[in-house]
């Protein structure tokens, strides 16, 4: 079934217009990343930085990546966020499956507790959490940033629960007739049908972990362990902010997040576009 | 008992251990702290219900609570509608659609600091382009979007919706893609228009996802600290301060942890109740593929 | 068997003595809050380590909004660094909670007070600002000055501000400097701007010999002279319209208004010299002057508003002497001038009066004015819970800040604001100072 050309055109126009509204702050960020500190704030905003296409163009990038060790921080964040996101996939898909399809005592209470943890802001629980981590000896390691994510995730569990609930029980019944056990049901029947959920959770869990600032600030002492968000804060001083460097760092920070997004879209979502539920 | 008795607990093992070790303890501690006066750097002092009574009598708290309610009531529908709209839009099989999906996702991952600076500048009464644009259209009294206490909060909502629409687009998209094509085909055979398809196929089959997204959006509307700090610092005079901002400020600027904890639990009570009500009402509008 | 064991123990003992005698290396942890100066600070630390070979310093630099949650968490766990930065806003609370070491005897023993701006030390004395012991020591201080755009003054044919300026002179100048194309429109250029910020308000109050707090600094008690100052500022905006209402200037960082040529005059902290140079570049010439004395100023009153950034030693550090050695170095004459932003004054007079700091060849050229202010009597409004009632940093829109912003927006009168500030402020202060 082909889409009429006029419809296609209208869609493209709409897409582009909307795209313009979402992209301009990012464009400003990129443009500022090529500016010198004096150029950042001026009355007539100049979108074309003075140093563009000169040999000084990449100065800011060089400065932050090397002198301010930003490359190291980005690598650290990549490691932490990837591990945490994978951990979330494992823990939340399993838990979501149990909540969606199984019957057990205390189900709704447990689920309620999970949701409740989302509603208490981190700033009031961080100090007690910090004391627990100290007791465990996890201070100045990545463990406080990764291990909780590998075990429990309210958002992810809720997401998977919703998705798994939406899979028709006819599939489940058929599989039972074939004599599968819980694990096979989980791996062979439900997970393959939840690819969009997997992709979405990975994207979001990765992003949430990447953007977390409070936990790395509290737990990470040695500067070689610092994450990208902490690295960005290096450009804020007591009496002023080095905007040109801060925004350069923000641009660099965005790249892994976009990459994860595109990867997930390619490998998980595209495959589902026309197939629907697999039998 | 199709799965047996033991299976659920095995699947839930990491969650239960994780909850117990890392989440429940700090929450109980925070609850206890809400009955104390604690500035973090010295020992807590028991106060009984004094924090809660201070909250109830605090004009600022009620103002902030009202702001939070207004924020949530406008943000949740706003971001859901925008997210759904975008998701339906990018669910089309067009060349390069992945590029557009990425584009709409950009605000979600752009740092809040950068977004704060750019939007503040755009909306600024002195040289903001929006102001100049409106002047050009002949509007005489362009309001100060961020500086006027009547508009500051709603402006924050608009910026936050703009930022997070892409996030909800992803979630709605995942939900849309889970709807088997066969339903659409059946509807088209019956002669349904795209509008009718949306109403009778998409929306009902999207309902579990919609419910999930609604709860998530509600919780998100309570996590507004970063954007508020970047754009208005709760101003002018607390006009745009939400509970998230107020809690952070009391916890880590004033170091009144006890007070911050007490307001968190008041918020938790309110949101928890709302969520419970929503879960109870769920059976009236959420259907699954079954 | 016993003989073997005892021999083994003796050898072990000897080895450990040897190790102890040879190493004796002390590692100090130092936390500072200005990452933008971290490399310069690191150079200073390297110099210190060279001069003190048995002391190693692990320095960590965090931006202010990360610094405080982190340091406080460390305090909870009893893990404070040996040496760390301390602000005037939080000093009293930390001293009260016993986290800072009393360094009075060390100061008396090792420092020649004539080398330092002793008046500034008062902000780090506890419990009494005049007679208390020192629990932290400043490494720099700042004071508000009046910035003015020389080119705009020349254009309007006005003489530059001087020490004899009265508030009427100021108003007249501001009126001539305000440029607007039509009545009741926002001006293209304002003579001046202000809002509720502490660095904008307090200088005018003190210039009129006014007080915001009572004598003991435990309650809000805005006296008539302070009220006069607030009314003057309010009139600048609402009556004479030489200053914009606050809501008109949001969206631009307040410290960029003057450098971007939006206003002709500005009162704020001296550290802004650095930013003005950077943002304005060669666009215009600027100068600094004292905040004009008000009509009710007591003759001979040299009260000025200044406040320090300080360094403290943890009360529980096991390395008292080593930590003090580091602190002495950080506040002393070895500190490179580049570690001070232009306009931020070193606590050491030798450094402050040096050519490198005064920079007479660069704008504004008369920085010794700042130093003169530092020789006056200091007054501030810092109390326990200051951030709560004053409205500072992330809370910039609330408390006294917020109430005065409303005055600037024409939403309430000065008297209504004073009433609100007093009520709210005393509510906060009575929690910290429960007596009376």
Image: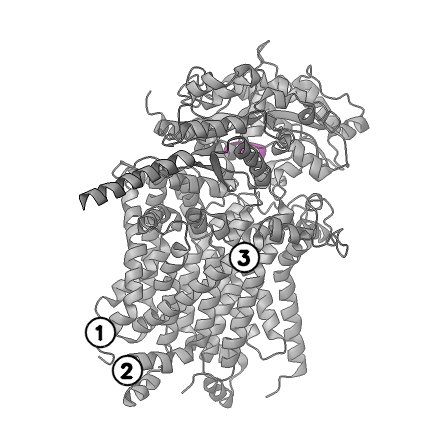
Q: Does residue C418 lie above or below A104 as drawn? A: above
Does residue A226 appear in the picture of this structure?
Answer: no
Mark number displayed over residue B6:
1
Q: Residues within 10 Å of mark 1 (few under 14, many from 20)?
A: few
Q: Are marks 1 and 2 in contact (CB under 8 Å)?
A: no
Q: Quadrant of residue A16?
A: bottom right
Tell me if C429 is positioned left or right of C418 in this view. Answer: left
Does residue C127 appear in the picture of this structure?
Answer: yes
Q: Of marks 2 and 3, which one's residue comes earlier in the chain?
A: 3
To which residue does mark 3 refer?
A74
Q: Does residue C4 lie above or below C95 as drawn? A: below
* Most foreground residue, C425 or B153: C425
To which residue does mark 2 refer?
A181
Q: Position of residue C352 (x, y in %)?
A: 63, 23
Tell me if C7 is positioned left or right of C205 in this view. Answer: left
Tell me if A222 is positioned left or right of A34 in this view. Answer: left
Q: Residues within 10 Å of mark 3 (few under 14, many from 20)?
A: many
Q: Element type at marker 1?
A: loop
Q: Nearer the viewer, mark 3 or mark 1?
A: 3
Q: Chain of mark 1?
A: B
Report, in whole angstroms, how far the alpha carbon at label 2 lies from the one at label 3: 42 Å
């Amino acid at each position: 079934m082909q889409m009429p050309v006029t419809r296609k055109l209208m869609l493209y126009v709409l897409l582009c217009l909307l795209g313009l509204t979402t992209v301009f702050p990012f464009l400003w960020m990129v443009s500022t990343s090529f500016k010198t500190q004096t150029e950042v704030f001026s009355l007539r905003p100049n979108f074309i930085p003075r140093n563009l296409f000169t040999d000084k163009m990449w100065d800011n990038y060089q400065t932050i990546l090397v002198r301010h060790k930003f490359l190291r921080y980005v690598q650290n964040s990549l490691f932490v966020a990837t591990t945490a996101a994978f951990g979330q996939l494992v823990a939340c898909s399993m838990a979501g499956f149990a909540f969606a399809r199984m019957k057990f005592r205390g189900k709704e209470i447990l689920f309620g507790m999970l949701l409740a943890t989302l509603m208490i802001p981190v700033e009031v629980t961080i100090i007690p959490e910090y004391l627990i981590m100290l007791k465990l000896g996890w201070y100045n390691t990545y463990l406080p940033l990764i291990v909780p994510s590998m075990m429990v995730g309210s958002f992810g569990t809720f997401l998977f629960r919703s998705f798994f609930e939406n899979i028709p029980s006819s599939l489940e019944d058929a599989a039972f007739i074939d004599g599968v056990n819980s694990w096979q049901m989980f791996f062979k029947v439900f997970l393959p049908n939840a690819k969009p959920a997997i992709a979405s959770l990975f994207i979001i869990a990765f992003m949430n972990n990447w953007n977390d600032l409070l936990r790395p600030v509290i737990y990470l002492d040695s500067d070689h362990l610092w994450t990208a968000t902490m690295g960005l804060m290096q450009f804020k001083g007591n009496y002023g902010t080095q905007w040109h460097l801060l925004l350069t760092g923000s641009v660099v920070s965005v790249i892994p997040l976009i990459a994860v997004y595109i990867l997930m879209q390619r490998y998980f979502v595209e495959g589902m576009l026309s197939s629907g539920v697999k039998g | 008992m199709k799965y047996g008795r033991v299976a659920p607990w095995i699947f839930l093992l990491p969650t239960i251990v994780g909850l117990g070790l890392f989440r429940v303890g700090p929450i109980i501690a925070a609850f206890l702290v809400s009955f104390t006066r604690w500035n973090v750097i010295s020992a807590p002092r028991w106060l009984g219900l004094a924090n809660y009574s201070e909250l109830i009598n605090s004009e600022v708290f009620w103002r902030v609570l009202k702001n939070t309610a207004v924020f949530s009531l406008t943000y949740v529908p706003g971001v859901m509608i925008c997210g759904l709209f975008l998701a339906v839009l990018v669910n089309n099989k067009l060349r390069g659609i992945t590029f557009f999906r990425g584009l709409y996702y950009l605000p979600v991952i752009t740092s809040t600091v950068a977004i704060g600076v750019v939007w503040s500048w755009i909306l600024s009464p002195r040289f903001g382009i929006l102001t100049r644009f409106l002047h050009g259209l002949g509007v005489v009294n362009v309001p100060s979007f961020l500086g006027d206490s009547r508009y500051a909060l709603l402006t924050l909502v608009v910026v936050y919706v703009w930022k997070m629409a892409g996030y909800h687009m992803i979630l709605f998209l995942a939900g849309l893609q889970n709807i088997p094509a066969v339903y659409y085909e059946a509807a088209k055979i019956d002669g349904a228009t795209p509008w009718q398809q949306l109403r009778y196929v998409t929306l009902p089959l999207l309902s579990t996802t919609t419910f999930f997204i609604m709860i998530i959006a509600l919780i998100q509307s309570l996590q507004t600290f970063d954007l508020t700090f970047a754009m208005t610092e709760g101003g002018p005079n607390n006009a745009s301060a939400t509970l998230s901002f107020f809690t952070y400020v009391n916890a880590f600027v004033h170091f009144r942890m006890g007070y911050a904890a007490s307001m968190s639990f008041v918020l938790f009570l309110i949101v928890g109740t709302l969520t419970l009500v929503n879960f109870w009402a769920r059976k009236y509008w959420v259907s699954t593929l079954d | 068997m016993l003989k073997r064991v005892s021999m083994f123990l003796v050898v072990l003992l000897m080895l450990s003595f040897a190790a102890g005698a040879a190493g004796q290396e002390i590692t100090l942890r130092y936390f500072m809050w200005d990452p933008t100066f971290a490399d310069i600070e690191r150079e200073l630390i390297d110099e210190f380590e060279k001069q003190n070979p048995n002391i190693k310093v692990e320095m960590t630099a965090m931006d202010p909004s990360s610094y405080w949650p982190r340091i406080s968490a460390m305090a909870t766990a009893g893990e404070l660094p040996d040496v760390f930065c301390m602000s005037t806003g939080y000093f009293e609370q930390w001293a009260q909670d016993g986290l800072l070491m009393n360094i009075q005897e060390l100061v008396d023993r090792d420092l020649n007070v004539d080398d330092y701006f002793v008046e500034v030390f008062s902000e780090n004395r506890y419990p009494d600002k005049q007679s208390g012991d020192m629990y932290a020591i400043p490494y720099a201080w700042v004071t508000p000055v009046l910035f003015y755009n020389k080119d705009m003054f020349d254009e309007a044919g006005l003489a530059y501000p001087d020490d004899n300026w009265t508030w009427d002179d100021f108003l007249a100048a501001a009126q001539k400097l305000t440029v607007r194309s039509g009545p009741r429109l926002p001006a293209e250029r304002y003579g001046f701007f202000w809002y509720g910020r502490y660095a904008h308000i307090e200088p005018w109050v003190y210039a009129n010999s006014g007080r915001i707090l009572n004598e003991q600094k435990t309650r809000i008690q805005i006296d008539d002279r302070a009220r006069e100052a607030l009314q003057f500022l309010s009139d600048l905006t609402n009556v004479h319209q030489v200053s914009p209402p606050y809501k008109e200037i949001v969206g631009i960082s307040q410290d960029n208004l003057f450098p971007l040529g939006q206003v002709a005059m500005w009162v704020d902290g001296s550290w802004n010299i650095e930013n003005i140079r950077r943002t304005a570049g060669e666009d215009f010439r600027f100068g600094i002057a004292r905040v004009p004395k008000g009509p009710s100023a007591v003759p001979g009153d040299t009260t000025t508003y200044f406040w320090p950034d300080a360094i403290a030693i943890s009360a529980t550090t096991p390395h008292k002497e080593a930590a003090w050695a580091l602190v002495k170095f950080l506040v002393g004459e070895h500190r490179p001038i580049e570690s001070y932003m232009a306009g931020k004054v070193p606590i050491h007079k030798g450094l402050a009066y040096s050519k490198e700091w005064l920079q007479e060849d660069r704008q504004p050229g008369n920085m010794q004015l700042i130093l003169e202010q530092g020789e006056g009597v200091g007054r501030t409004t810092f109390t326990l819970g200051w951030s709560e009632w004053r409205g500072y940093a992330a809370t910039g829109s609330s408390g006294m800040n917020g109430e005065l912003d409303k005055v600037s927006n024409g939403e309430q009168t000065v008297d209504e604001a004073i009433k609100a500030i007093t009520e709210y402020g005393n509510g906060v202060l009575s929690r910290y100072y429960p007596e009376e």
